[in-house]
Image (cartoon, grey):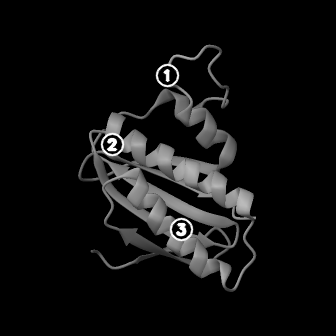
Amino acid sequence: MRPAEDRRAGDGGVLRFRPAEVSSASAARGFVKSVVEEHARTSPVDERAVMDLMLVVSELVTNAIRHGDGLAGFEVAVEREGLRLRVHDYSDTVPAAAYGPGTLPQTHEGSGYGWPLIIRLTREIRIDRRREGGKTVSVLAPLT
């Protein structure tokens, strides 16, 4: 496992990203749950926000596996505003829906709900290309 990476937060503080060796949405949720439980010992956490967070984790990791040529990495950092997720995959393709309005599909086609849910439940969606190929999807999910 790689050591945690520091990065400047929006408020000038330092974010400490914690990488996790996960290969499924279930494992990613388990890791996030442990981070949230640790954070909840000293800070308020809203249970409904945590349920929304778990849905976002599932969608992002599943998207990386199904549409991003595989999951290349998963990291989290606690911020004042919530939990920052970074999901790395191997595809250079940026999903068009990621910058959409978050409108749910009009008919049930079996898919197409992921990005609208992510857009509705998170803040600060960012997609960056990785030097080694692929992309990183970063979102901020509120905890309160």
Name the amino acid type tagged 1.
Gly
Residue 118 placement: quadrant: top right
Residue at mark 2: 65
The mark lying in front, picked from 2 and 3, is 3
Front-lying residue, 77 or 56 = 56
Residue at mark 1: 110
> How many residues crowd around disc 2 within 10 Å: few (fewer than 14), some, or many (20 or more)?
some
Q: Residue at x 59, y 72 (%)?
A: 36
Q: Secondary structure at mark 2?
A: helix
Checking the image for residue 33, the label placed there is 3
Looking at the image, is mark 2 or mark 1 earlier in the sequence? 2
Name the amino acid type tagged 2.
Ile
Image vertical order of residue 69 relative to residue 24, above or below: above
Image vertical order of residue 77 relative to residue 62, above or below: below
Where does the image place residue 16, in percent across and percent down from the top left? Answer: 49, 77
- Position of the C terminus, as image quadrant, is bottom right
- Answer yes or no: do the residues labelled 1 and 3 have beta carbons within 8 Å? no
Looking at the image, is mark 2 or mark 3 earlier in the sequence? 3
Side of 17 relative to 36 (left or right): left
Checking the image for residue 63, the label placed there is none
Residue 13 appearing in the image: no
Side of 6 relative to 83 (left or right): left
Name the amino acid type tagged 3.
Lys
Q: Secondary structure at mark 3?
A: helix
